[in-house]
């Protein structure tokens, strides 16, 4: 995990930023720009998964939970903003007389909503991570536990139709912090915010990976006991990475809502959480760009193939996953290094050539 | 001046099985202290208990402070460092990164967020001391077995450990590497407590100042190399001659 040239990676982020923020809006149709915006949201969550799983070794199978915290915070605010002084339509449908649920009330405030998007995942991941890491819960147990949380939250949302919209979710947002969402100019702005946040998240992990913390995180991933014997508490190291990854998932979820226009439990449950992991594994979990690009690729596959040939898409995704895990355990981003290594080998080992020559002689 | 490490009546049980049954020994700076004994004698378990990895009763004091009962990382922060029977370094990180992490516990937490600039003087000294100066940028995973052991010792040095507990540091080393390690231990023992667990009797004879022999979780004999070797009980445990000690 030695990154001798961090500045090259920084240049890469620069190129990526130009592509997303300047080139994409110029060349893409509104429809596709909106799609790319959606991929950016998944990519933001993926960057966090890369940090927690790729560098920290924590298989976070329930990032949907944190995605949901951001997404539903945002969705509640936008729903209230669109409803104005009235009670949101779907609630009236189920019970015309009941008041707005208590926990919705503070989300009228834009400031509270933004704070919630940041603080809810930090607090939840902080408590959860503290409890798990101090008790040294890791590996499969950690993965299953986080996954179970995602399932539980999705089920809870499904079953509380009047409070959360249930399986139909929250949708029909008209305003985004005062901006009319239907306006193409505002749509572009929302896209730019999401893409900009993705670039910021990449910058954040770029700095984390080159910092001493990044080295300590890799050390903790590879030999937790040894780290403890150097006087650190590995639980704290993992906690920081886990909290940051939860925050990123929440930010991704929050931006998902105005871009896609709907949030349902299906977007945050077990399947969605695993799909987030799949993109990260596909792109290369420990690399800087791998998780984001992998998530975008999976997102793209889903909206192109997934809509035209849904049954086939699932199999293709599964097959891709198997192939990558079998032949490229470090994801597609390790491919260039693999090819380079394969190219170098014949030069270093000229030995086989005479054998071939001999065979030729025998044959002739 | 560093205080002594005093272990008194240490007992460690694993679900009823007594691995260490009332062991006492002490170690002072300035001596290379050896803990020897046949396989399963409880040597590693003694170190595990002192470093908080295994729960034990009795007492292990460094200076005035009781070590038993504290969590591992707190014992480390009191100045107790150890190596493991199988070298455990961070394979994917370079020698410098390994050492930098070891040096890190003296840094404020927030400084972790910055990238490393230059090499700490303490790291340079440790590299010099252990002869690893040329391997600064080498990933630890591709170091030779001996070099990994030295890297572990270097990590203890930059950690500024007052107590170095070394579990079979020369196992698998060549004769030259053993000599280099022995001399290294003598140098660093001048100001620190060095306790070595070893099977290699030749190595023990050359570098030990004081020896404790464990057998089946108890102290069999204690004293200088000559005294211990002359002890008939020790000779019996080691099949008649002190030379015939099997390696792992
Ligand atoms: N975690 C454990 N659970 C149960 N028994 C253990 C455990 N650790 C050690 N033992 C037992 O305690 C005894 C002492 O083991 P220990 O590893 O301390 O021996 P040692 O003197 O270091 O031996 P060696 O020279 O082989 O390293 C052995 O019988 C071992 O099987
Ligand atoms: Mg042992």
Image (spheres, coloured by chain):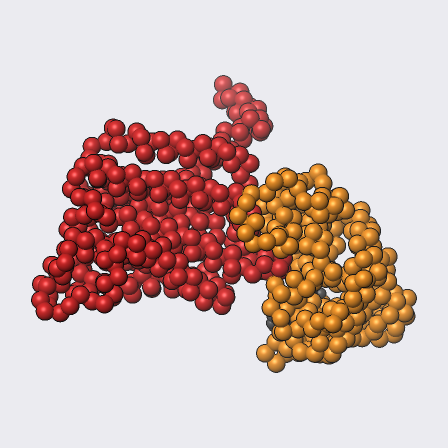
Chain colours: A red, B orange
Work out whether residue B93 or residue A343 is closer to the camera in this orientation and state it. B93
- Which residue reaches farthest top? A364
- The image shows residue A334, relative to residue B147, as above or below, that is above
- The image shows residue A30, relative to residue B211, as above or below, that is above
Work out whether residue B138 or residue B60 is closer to the camera in this orientation and state it. B60
Work out whether residue A364 or residue A187 is closer to the camera in this orientation and state it. A187
Q: Residue sitting at 44 percent across and 44 percent down?
A: A204
**Left or right side of A124 for B87:** right
Q: Position of residue A209 (x, y in %)?
A: 50, 44
Work out whether residue B17 or residue A81 is closer to the camera in this orientation and state it. A81
- The image shows residue B66, relative to residue A51, as above or below, that is below
**Left or right side of B187 for B92:** left
Q: Position of residue A53 (x, y in %)?
A: 44, 52
Q: Residue A327 falls in which quadrant of the image?
A: top left
- The image shows residue B123, relative to residue A119, as above or below, that is above
In the rendered picture of this protein, how many numbered marks are placed on residues?
0
**Left or right side of B129 for A326:** left
Q: Residue sitting at 15 percent across and 42 percent down?
A: A182
Q: Residue sitting at 90 percent across and 69 percent down?
A: B227
**Left or right side of A160 for A351:** right
Residue B25 appears in view? yes
Q: Residue sitting at 32 percent across and 39 percent down?
A: A195
Q: Position of residue B121 (x, y in %)?
A: 71, 44
- Which residue reaches farthest bottom? B16
Q: Residue A15 falls in which quadrant of the image?
A: top left
Q: Position of residue B118 (x, y in %)?
A: 64, 39
Residue A67 appears in view? no
């Amino acid at each position: 995990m030695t990154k001798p040239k961090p500045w090259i990676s920084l240049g890469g982020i620069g190129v990526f930023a130009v592509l997303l923020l300047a080139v994409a809006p110029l060349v893409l149709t509104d429809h596709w720009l909106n799609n790319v915006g959606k991929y950016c949201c998944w990519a933001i969550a993926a960057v966090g998964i890369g940090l927690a799983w790729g560098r920290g070794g924590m298989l976070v199978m329930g990032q949907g939970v944190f995605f949901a915290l951001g997404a539903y915070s945002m969705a509640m605010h936008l729903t209230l903003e669109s409803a104005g002084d009235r009670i949101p339509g779907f609630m009236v449908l189920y019970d015309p007389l009941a008041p707005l649920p208590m926990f919705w009330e503070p989300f009228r405030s834009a400031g509270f909503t933004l704070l919630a998007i940041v603080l809810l995942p930090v607090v939840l991941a902080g408590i959860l991570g503290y409890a798990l890491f101090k008790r040294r819960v890791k590996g499969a147990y950690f993965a299953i536990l986080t996954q179970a949380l995602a399932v539980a939250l999705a089920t809870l949302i499904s079953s509380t139709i009047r409070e959360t919209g249930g399986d139909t979710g929250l949708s029909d947002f008209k305003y985004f912090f005062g901006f009319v969402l239907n306006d193409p100019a505002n749509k572009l702005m929302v896209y730019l915010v999401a893409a900009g946040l993705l670039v910021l998240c990449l910058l954040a992990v770029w700095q984390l990976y080159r910092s001493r913390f990044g080295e300590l995180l890799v050390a903790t991933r590879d030999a937790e006991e040894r780290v403890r014997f150097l006087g650190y508490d590995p639980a704290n190291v993992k906690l920081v990475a886990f909290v940051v990854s939860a925050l990123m998932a929440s930010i991704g979820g929050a931006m998902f809502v105005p871009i896609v226009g709907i949030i349902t439990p299906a977007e945050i449950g077990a399947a969605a959480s695993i799909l987030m992991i799949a993109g990260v594994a596909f792109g290369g979990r420990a690399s800087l760009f791998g998780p984001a690009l992998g998530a975008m690729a999976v997102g793209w596959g889903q909206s192109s193939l997934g809509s035209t040939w849904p049954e086939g898409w699932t199999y293709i995704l599964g097959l891709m996953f198997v192939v990558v895990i079998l032949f490229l355990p470090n994801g597609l981003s390790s491919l260039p290094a693999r090819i380079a290594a394969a190219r170098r080998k014949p030069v270093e080992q000229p030995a086989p050539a005479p054998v071939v020559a001999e065979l030729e002689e025998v044959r002739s | 001046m560093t205080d002594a490490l005093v272990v008194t009546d240490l007992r460690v049980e694993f679900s009823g099985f007594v691995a260490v049954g009332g062991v006492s020994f002490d170690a002072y700076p300035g001596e290379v202290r050896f803990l020897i004994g046949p396989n399963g004698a409880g040597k590693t378990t003694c170190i595990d208990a002192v470093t908080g990895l295994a729960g034990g009763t009795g007492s292990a004091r460094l200076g005035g402070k009781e070590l038993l009962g504290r969590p591992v990382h707190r014992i480390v922060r009191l100045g107790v460092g150890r190596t493991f029977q199988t070298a455990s370094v961070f394979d994917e990180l370079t020698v410098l990164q390994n050492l930098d992490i070891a040096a890190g516990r003296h840094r404020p937490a927030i400084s972790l967020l910055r990238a490393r600039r230059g090499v700490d003087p303490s790291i340079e000294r440790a590299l010099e001391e252990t002869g690893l100066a040329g391997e600064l940028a080498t990933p630890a995973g591709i170091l030779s077995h001996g070099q990994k052991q030295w890297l572990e010792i270097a990590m203890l040095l930059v950690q500024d450990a007052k107590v170095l507990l070394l579990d079979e540091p020369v196992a698998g080393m060549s004769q030259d590497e053993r000599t280099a390690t022995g001399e290294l231990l003598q140098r660093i023992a001048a100001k620190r407590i060095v306790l070595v667990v070893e099977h290699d009797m030749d190595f023990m004879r050359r570098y030990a100042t004081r020896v404790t022999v464990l057998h089946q979780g108890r102290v069999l004999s204690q004293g200088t190399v000559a005294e211990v070797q002359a002890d008939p009980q020790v000779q019996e445990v080691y099949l008649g001659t002190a030379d015939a000690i099997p390696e792992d």
